[in-house]
């Protein structure tokens, strides 16, 4: 389960080949010799594996970058990788193991909110620190978690506001489909509160949930067609299904001939990786919203994309070398922001590191300077709305001017 | 706005006559391109409508053909983001490595400092672009006598209210349109005639909408009904409510059929996934946890064949699914036989061990495929004849690929039945299943039967993978999604019985899908599981059980 050999190979290759002198000096210089472990909690098997698994490698890549630049506080960082197998209780078990047995000073992990909720008590009780890279439902503010990505107020609601504006097609009726767990249910609860504040009544939306890994969407899409043709204004689908259900949903949408011009889909968990294997010419125009889109143009983004494709080919990883998705960037940001916090605290001890969060900034590949305030453990990120293009990617349709202040607790929930 | 513009324009054209029609056109077209370059949805939609009207400005077929071709070129460039604009609002169309002026279509070059940007395609622009492209295509076809794509015709149907009125009245005047297009135009006209005061027009509209019953036509009629004042002519009120009732009935029939169809389609998938397992489980009592991985391997072999055809025999691509059938069956069967020979045969006396061993095999296969192909979902080419479907009753859409899966399942059922019941091999299989020792005593090579039937079970799973490849996600872990459902079906149906598997697949599939619209997909799963537990309580051997001497 613990992949130490792979790590040594990876960091050795990267740090050793190009920046050997720096690597050596950090190991043998200044009397700080030794290593410090950090842990990864991302599933490389089970329902979430397709997208979640690659985050392990991203953390390895970011850690290798830290090491190449001399390590953190002069120590070489070592990554310990586990596989919680998309099995929620296993996240807690592996997390405990990483904290108590491996003495990891920071954990990077979890995709679904249910897995985060499962690890939460473990990190809180054992003085751990979890960097969580996904945008999520908010309504949580633990001292032991760094929320790298946006709560709904700075991701979903701006996207809805756009769709309800004239430019976005004046959407006024919503069909919400989600996987049955805490993230979709809370997001939809917030959405409903938001609708009420905009004067949208209960007849104008419908919500339905499916089990994890559900793939037979015929009935639901029949129902969506029926809903869309009822009176009352422009229909929109808000999609919060996760994992393998996303491409399955899109396959049935293509199959039943529904285009973005008929019923646009706002896919809140839809990523470039979910479009792999789909004929996107029939999906052009559907939307998603994230804090990073691959097509954004800036130097940091160019850097991380080329670093990733080199990392993939150098280690023979089974991931696409030219797909870079928001959670990957968020995990990457997380490793670097942890490094900065430790350097500032001058120690790896978690309570001191937490004290050092206020005012930490990082030049994110999204082009925004992302930052943490002392108020909570959220990171302020920019907002993008993307639109599916024909090359299985997203064009940027809209992006925010700056990084809105994250609001952990929504007034609409 | 649009109307005013086009009106003024036609007046101007009439005055100018033949004097400088070309110059006028140039001005008009550059205004259209300027509008498209604005990135503002309202202006872009106006420009698109002006573009539509522009195609039917003249009555000269040659001019119409030219303008229509230009309009289609511009719209396709717009939607494909090949139309790029300079900051001053002049448009260009990007080609492979060339740049053309949008208005004149002539090759051109632009100073490198000028930043060319594709206009934003906000959501409201897409429908207009689609519908103008569709009517323009029909107009072009009426001049050149070409065929119009189904996709274009369908978009007319979806948004009748957005059809450009000038293009529409031009099309209505054409007498040479094929029947399908005439029908479609009638439907568009019907939506417009609903507003008509004339009673004959109104009843024609109602008749057409009744013929094309859908939720959309129902919504339109209900809207009209609520706007009819009580003093309005009594027959109009009555006609409307009759039409509404008729459409509602048809919609209900359509809804019922579409649940039934979804159920059948789901059942066919369950059956395909379970039939191989039923044979292996029934014959050898081996609980093969790697069965899901054979489904996955079948899909991957289909993918490899698709890729090979794409590089070496592109012409055969539309038939790759048919071509794959024998390869998938033989190759997955072969892999199954190899696993039986190398792993499972040593463990026949230890059923618990086979459980563990096949689980190990499953993990091995998943990771082997992951290393060879990567974790991402594979892209399958879906041949044209499997895309889309046909609408029967109301909104009941029969999708071709689901229909093909149902057909394939029936074919697999028949072939398996013939193989097991009508061939020498089948007799041997049944003999070994019923009494292994006795079968061995009368000279049946039970080892050979074991290997062959394991291969048969694996081959059938491979075929399931082939059938699923166009419907579901194909990735290394796809098999695990099916193994639980497949076991459920086999246990419910009765171990080793083909008919039992069929009946159980139908039951689980249809019950599941029928509960879904009422209680939701989550509850459906719970209810089906509960039902299965209850059935197993009363019939532990499953619905159909073979008499077996252990």
Image (cartoon, helix red, strand yellow):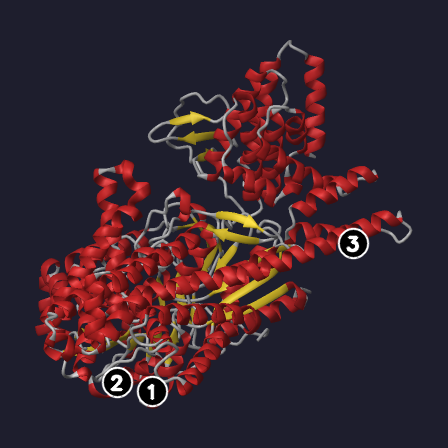
Up-down relation of residue A260 to residue B473 (above or below) = above
Q: Residue furthest top?
A: B19
Label 2: few (<14), some (14–19) or many (≥20) C-alpha neighbours in 10 Å: many
Q: Are marks 1 and 2 on the same chain?
A: yes
Viewport quadrant of the N terminus of chain A: bottom left
Of all chains, the one bearing label 2 is: A
Label 1: few (<14), some (14–19) or many (≥20) C-alpha neighbours in 10 Å: many
Q: Position of residue B47 (x, y in %)?
A: 60, 34
Which residue lies under the disc numbered 3? B241
Which residue lies under the disc numbered 1? A122
Q: Position of residue B459 (x, y in %)?
A: 23, 61
Q: Disc 1 and disc 3: Cα gap in Å? A: 64 Å
What's the mark number on residue B421? none
Q: Disc 2 and disc 3: Cα gap in Å? A: 70 Å
- Name which residue lies at 45% across and 29% down: B92
Q: Disc 1 and disc 2: Cα gap in Å? A: 9 Å
Label 3: few (<14), some (14–19) or many (≥20) C-alpha neighbours in 10 Å: some
- Name which residue lies at 52% across and 74% down: A186
Q: Nearer the viewer, residue B245 or A243?
A: B245
What's the mark number on residue A99? 2
């Amino acid at each position: 389960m613990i992949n130490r050999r792979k790590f040594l190979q990876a960091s050795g290759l990267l740090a050793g080949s190009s920046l050997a002198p720096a690597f050596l000096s950090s190991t043998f210089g200044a009397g700080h010799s030794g290593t410090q472990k950090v842990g990864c909690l991302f599933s490389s098997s089970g329902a979430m594996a397709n997208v979640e698994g690659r985050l392990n490698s991203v953390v390895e890549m970011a850690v290798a970058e830290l090491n190449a630049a001399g390590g953190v506080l002069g120590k070489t960082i070592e990554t310990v990788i586990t596989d919680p197998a998309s099995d929620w209780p296993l996240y807690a078990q592996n997390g405990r193991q990483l904290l108590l047995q491996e003495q990891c000073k920071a954990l990077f992990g979890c995709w679904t909110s249910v897995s985060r909720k499962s690890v939460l008590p473990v990190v809180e009780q054992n003085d751990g620190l979890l960097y969580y890279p996904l945008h999520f439902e908010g309504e949580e503010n633990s001292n032991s978690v760094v929320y790298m990505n946006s709560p709904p107020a700075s991701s979903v609601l701006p996207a809805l506001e756009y769709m309800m504006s004239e430019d976005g097609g004046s959407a006024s009726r919503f069909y919400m489909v989600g996987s049955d767990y805490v993230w979709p249910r809370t997001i939809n609860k917030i959405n409903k509160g938001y609708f009420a504040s905009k004067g949208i009544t209960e007849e104008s939306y419908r919500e339905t949930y499916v089990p994890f890994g559900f793939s037979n969407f015929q009935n639901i899409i029949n129902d969506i067609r029926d809903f869309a043709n009822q009176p009352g204004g422009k229909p929109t689908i808000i999609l919060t299904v996760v994992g393998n259900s996303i491409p399955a949903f899109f396959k049935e949408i293509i199959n039943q001939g529904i285009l973005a011009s008929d019923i646009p889909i706002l896919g809140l968990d839809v990523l470039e990786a979910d479009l792999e294997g789909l004929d996107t010419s029939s999906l052009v125009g559907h939307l998603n919203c994230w804090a990073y889109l691959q097509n954004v143009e800036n130097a940091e983004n160019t850097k991380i994309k080329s670093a990733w494709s080199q990392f993939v080919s150098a280690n023979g990883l089974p991931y696409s070398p030219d797909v870079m998705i928001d959670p990957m960037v968020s995990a990457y940001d997380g490793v670097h922001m942890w490094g900065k916090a430790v350097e500032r605290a001058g120690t790896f001890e978690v309570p001191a590191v937490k004290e050092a969060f206020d005012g930490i900034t990082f030049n994110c590949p999204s082009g925004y300077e992302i930052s943490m305030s002392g108020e909570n453990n959220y990171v302020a990120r920019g907002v993008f709305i993307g639109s599916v293009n024909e090359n299985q990617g997203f064009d940027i349709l809209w992006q925010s001017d700056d990084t809105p202040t994250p609001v952990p607790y929504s007034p609409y929930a | 706005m649009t109307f005013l513009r086009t009106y003024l324009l036609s007046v101007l054209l009439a005055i100018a006559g033949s004097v400088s029609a070309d110059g006028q056109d140039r001005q008009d077209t550059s205004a259209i391109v300027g509008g498209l370059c604005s990135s503002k949805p309202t202006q872009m939609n106006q420009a698109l409508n002006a573009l539509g009207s522009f195609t039917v400005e003249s009555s000269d077929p040659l001019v119409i053909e030219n303008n229509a071709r230009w309009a289609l070129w511009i719209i396709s460039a717009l939607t494909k983001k090949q139309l790029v604009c300079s900051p001053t609002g002049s448009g260009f169309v990007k080609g492979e490595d060339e740049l053309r002026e949008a208005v004149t279509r002539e090759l051109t070059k632009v100073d490198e400092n000028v930043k060319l940007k594709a206009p934003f395609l906000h959501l409201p622009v897409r429908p207009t672009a689609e519908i103008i492209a569709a009517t323009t295509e029909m107009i072009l076809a009426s001049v050149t006598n070409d065929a119009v794509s189904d996709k274009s015709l369908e978009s007319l149907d979806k948004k009748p209210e957005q059809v450009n009125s000038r293009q529409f009245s031009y099309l209505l005047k054409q007498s040479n349109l094929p029947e399908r297009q005439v029908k479609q135009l009638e439907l568009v006209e019907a939506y417009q005639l609903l507003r008509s005061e004339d009673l004959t027009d109104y009843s024609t509209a109602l008749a057409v909408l009744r013929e094309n019953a859908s939720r959309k036509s129902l919504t339109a009629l209900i809207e009209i009904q609520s706007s009819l004042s009580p003093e309005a002519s009594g027959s109009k009120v009555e006609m409307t409510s009759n039409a509404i009732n008729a459409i509602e009935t048809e919609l209900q029939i359509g809804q019922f059929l579409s649940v039934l169809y979804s159920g059948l389609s789901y059942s066919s998938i369950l059956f395909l996934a379970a039939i191989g397992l039923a044979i292996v489980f029934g014959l050898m009592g081996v609980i093969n946890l790697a069965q899901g991985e054979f489904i996955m391997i079948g899909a991957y072999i289909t993918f490899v064949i698709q890729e090979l055809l794409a590089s070496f025999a592109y012409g055969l691509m539309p038939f790759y699914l048919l071509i794959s059938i024998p390869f998938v069956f033989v190759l997955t069967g072969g892999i199954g036989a190899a696993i039986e020979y190398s792993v499972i045969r040593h463990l026949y006396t230890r059923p618990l061990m086979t459980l563990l061993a096949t689980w190990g095999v499953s993990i091995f296969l998943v990771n082997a495929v992951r290393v060879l192909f990567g974790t991402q979902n594979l892209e399958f080419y879906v041949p044209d004849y499997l895309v889309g479907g046909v609408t029967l009753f109301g909104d009941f859409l029969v999708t071709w690929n689901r229909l093909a899966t149902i057909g394939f399942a029936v074919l697999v059922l028949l072939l398996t039945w013939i193989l097991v019941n009508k061939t020498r091999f089948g007799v041997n299989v049944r003999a070994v299943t019923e009494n292994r020792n006795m079968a061995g005593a009368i000279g049946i090579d039970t080892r050979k039967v074991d290997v062959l039937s394991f291969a048969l079970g694996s081959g059938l799973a491979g075929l399931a993978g082939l059938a699923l490849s166009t419907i579901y996600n194909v990735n290394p872990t796809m098999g695990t999604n099916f193994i639980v459902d497949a076991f459920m079906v086999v246990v419910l149906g009765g171990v080793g019985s083909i008919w039992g598997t069929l009946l159980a697949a139908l039951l689980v599939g249809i019950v599941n899908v029928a509960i879904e619209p009422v209680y939701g997909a989550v509850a459906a799963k719970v209810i089906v599981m509960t039902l299965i537990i209850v059935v197993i309580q009363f019939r532990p051997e499953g619905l159909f059980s073979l008499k077996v001497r252990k």
